[in-house]
Image (tube, helix red, strand yellow):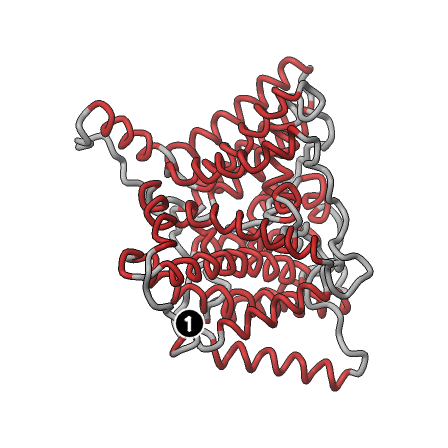
Amino acid sequence: MLFNSLQFALFLPVVFIIYWLLRRSLRWQNLFVLAASYLFYGWWDWRFLLLIAFTSACSYLSGILMASADARRSRILMWANIVVNLLVLGIFKYYDFFAQSFADLFLGGRSDGLLLHLVLPVGISFYTFQALSYSIDIHRRTVAPTRDPVAFFSYVSFFPQLVAGPIERASSLLPQFMQPRRFNYALAVDGLRQMLWGFFKKLLIADGCAVYVDKVFADPSQFGGSTLILAAILFSFQIYGDFSGYSDIAIGCSKLFGISLRRNFNVPYFSRDIAEFWRRWHISLTTWFRDYVYIPLGGSRVSKAKVVRNTFIIFLLSGFWHGANWTFLAWGFFHALLFLPLIVLGRNRRYRDTVAEGRLLPNLREALQMLLTFLLATLGWIIFRSPSIAFAVDYIGGFLRPGSLLWPLEGDHVFVIPALIIMLVVEWLNRDQAHEFVRQPRLRPLRWILYMLLIFIIMAFMQTSEMPFIYFQF
């Protein structure tokens, strides 16, 4: 079920009403959340429910067994759960990739009988990582295992963030299913406001850019360098509007149910170097790899050479997490290379504050730093978007090709540039807030005029067809 669908528009208010009618019974409320989440996820294909139930059951049972185990047995149980869940993830997401690569190398590309052609379950990487963090944290004794299966299964499958994050930790989300929740009007209003902003970014920014981007990336050889550059820039905003828009909708939707989720984006395109960019982009995944891979490898407490090694490992893993294609590995490798001079010079932790803090505008140096970081990220997004490495090389090589600019301010693309300007201005003015679009006029009539204006803009210029979120494929 897509957030931007009629089904969800009917699903959400019904679930909201029944959920709060059950507020006197925590168990029944959690049971209803679980049922609603499984309905939401099974809307694509009911068979997917078997996988998420299996992942949840393995992590739940291993947690109970680890509770009474000594350190050695706890480690064995943790690794058993990790291997089982990663094996499931690997079969569905990576088996055909490795089988085809093997066939290309040793069988002349003949893969008859080797490939399984399995349908990739929506969001499998997200909920698998969420379940694995639970087992790891139990082994580390930072989380106590729960014996409430309903609460735990709800934690893994909570529908707002189920298919594209944020990737939550048991230490923050699971306790919220273990205690009574009371309706908070102010929190719900803030959630609706954040959902509205998320829909703006998805339906206007992401879907509007997609029409232009898809046309150019379908056959880059037909366009001049200026058009290729513009399409690459628009894809940077497309993937940001799409993914951060989903996160805003998910976080805002959760607030309607009295559940708090972690922030997943923090205005990443206002970053002054690539290290700051990764502290602000897909925060839940970045911190997952930091806490469960980078730090156990020694983190930054080891020699400079091992820090470089650890950095390359997490970026290659992060790239491969996104999908079974060499382009994702190349994208991860590219960002690791960008990180390299910052690590060598000891500047990877330099910018941890808000850019131009206390000032309306950045100075010239900050503006140039943000522009350079954005352009480097855009080069990476070309690799990410391309079907092959050769395609990405040809695309970038076409930047110098002569040809007239295909301008997006026509037809279906008419509102893309003004919408981008609105988004950037709003996010810049609210860059130090918990989420964008929070500073509202104090007078209620002005607030409602602003909300209605935003809704009108969305309805007037959104694409008529339902466009899935980019990160559903991961």
Locate the N terminus by quadrant: bottom left
Q: Quadrant of residue 20?
A: bottom right
Does 447 sit above or below residue 255?
below
Position of 293 with respect to 217 (left or right) is: right
Does 474 sit above or below residue 83?
below
Return the residue at label 1.
408
The spot of residue 459 in percent (x, y) is 50, 79
The spot of residue 336 in percent (x, y) is 54, 34
Does 275 sit above or below residue 218?
above
Q: Residue at x 56, y 61 (%)?
A: 245
Q: Secondary structure at mark 1?
A: loop
Q: Residue at x 32, y 64 (%)?
A: 403
* Closest to the observer, 345 or 469: 345
The residue type indicated by label 1 comes to Pro
Q: Quadrant of residue 270?
A: bottom right
The spot of residue 112 in percent (x, y) is 17, 32
Position of 25 with respect to 18 (left or right) is: right
Does 172 sit above or below residue 194?
above
* Closest to the observer, 206 or 53: 206
